[in-house]
Image (cartoon, helix red, strand yellow):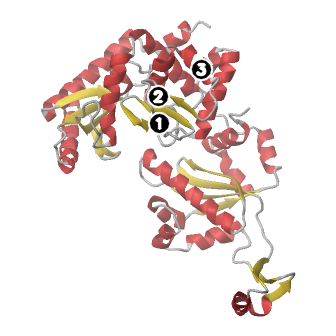
Amino acid sequence: MDYGSILKKVSPSAGEEKKVVSFANKALGAAERASGLGALICGSLGKGTWLSGNHDIDIFVLFPKETPRQYLEKKGLGIGAAVCKELGGSSCVRYAEHPYTMCMAGGFKVDIVPCYRIRPGESILSAVDRSPLHLEYVKANLEDKMKGEVRLLKQFCKAAGIYGSDAKTQGFSGYICELLVLKYGTFAGVVNAASKWRLPYTVDVAGHATGHREIFVVVDPTDASRNAAAVVSPYNIVKFIMAAKRFAASPSADYFREQKLKPLAAAQLRQLKARGTHFICLSMKRPDMVDDTLYPQARRAVSRLSGILRHNEFLPVRSGEFLGKEMIFFFELESGKLPEVKKMTGPPLFARKHVEEFAMKYGNLAYVEGINACADRKRDYRTPRELFLGIMKNGEKELAAMGIPEAVAKPLKSAKISEQDGFFRLLRDAGFSDLLRRMYFDSPMA
């Protein structure tokens, strides 16, 4: 297959590159002047593997290792503010492992991130310290002719919806794409190799001996103990392998075209309704925090609520979260209503002490069946709505004790419950509808 036309579309033009690099160098100079320290342009721009239209600029300011953490954070924010002022932009503070400055200036998003200057082989002091090491490794090992191959792989992943290591996507980072090309030489080499992967699988560019046990491992050549692919979800790993299989069997430019939102078709909506299950969701105010912080907490909340539903015998078939204008936790349950009574099978009759305790607890509800004491007691909750209302009555401390993350607890208390027809009306939101379409009708196994 001729990749020339695709590469031309995804690579920045000479004019675009000149404009972006010029502004990035301007930001770099401002950071060096404001800090009196060394600074680097990191990320895909610094490595020369960025895609056309992706103009994010990452400036890392390098502090000596002996710098106290508190000073680094405070000084780093001061440097960020000074850089943004010089660029004539507006800034805000964002948080990763420690705070950094995001600046919007000249039509560019510039992140000014303080980090420690770490030499290869030294232990990092914060997670962001790895970025300069990654930059150094890729620049030293990636040949110029490979940069186009990286861009093809990035676009392939982007079109599949699995590009980005952010908490929302849980996909392939630019660094993983660079390491895969370093391992296999070309985009075609990566795809052909991936089409034959059998999980669990390890990609080890530098030939480190590792003890990694994850389902998919890309060993970080700058730190053999780190899996660079740890953030990639199993779903996206399978999706990448299956896309590689299909592409290897029948290459097409279609695999590089990004998909637009595609809500559920009428026939698909009918299929969901015909499953005979019970759809219910909690809609609430979306907390004001960055996606990388909110998504993990939302997922933990959905997991915990699924466990509570299961404990009360409302068996989840599927569940998930959607973060749009509102935050929605949704659940498909085997049933939406349980009997009034719940059978409790107690101890065997020969366990006299336990039988007496069982009889004391259940009184005239207790009876004998076979060799066990049993009782038919009234259920605490007959419907998932009743259960959710019971959960929402708790205070934030009680919700935290139940395993509901702090960021979710407050909005959860005032959530709106929608089920069945009410749930399906929420699918008028194209983003939510697209999520369910992909979840139910776009299996990576197909």
Q: Is residue 216 visible?
A: yes
Return the disc, 3 or 2, that comes first in the chain's sequence: 2
Label 2: state its secondary structure. Answer: helix
Count of picture labels? 3
Q: Earlier in the sequence, mark 1 or mark 2?
A: 1
Q: Is residue 267 left or right of residue 438?
A: right
Separation of marks 1 and 2 at Cα, in angstroms: 9 Å
In the picture of the structure, the residue carrying the numbered disc 3 is: 193
Q: Which residue does the numbered mark 2 point to in the structure image?
A: 176
* Mark nearer the viewer, 3 or 2: 3
Viewer-nearest residue: 11 or 212:
212
Viewer-closest of 244 and 384 = 244
Q: CA distance from mark 1 to mark 3?
A: 22 Å
Locate residue 72 relative to residue 331 in the image: left or right: left
Q: Secondary structure at mark 1?
A: loop
- Residue kind at label 2, given as amino acid type: Ile
- Residue 41 image position (x, y, % from top left): 29, 26
**Residue holding disc 1:** 165
Rendered location of residue 248, percent (x, y): 66, 17
The image quarter containing residue 49 is top left
Displayed quadrant of residue 360: bottom right
In the rendered view, does 251 fall on the left or right side of 143?
right
Q: Is residue 284 visible?
A: no
Considering the image in quadrants, where does the N terminus appear? top right
Q: Position of residue 337 (x, y in %)?
A: 77, 67
Marks 1 and 3, the one that precedes in the sequence: 1
* Residue located at (49% from left, 50% from top): 296
Q: Please, what secondary structure does the residue beneath circle 3 have? A: helix
Mark 1 touching mark 2, by CB under 8 A? yes
The CA span between labels 3 and 2 is 15 Å
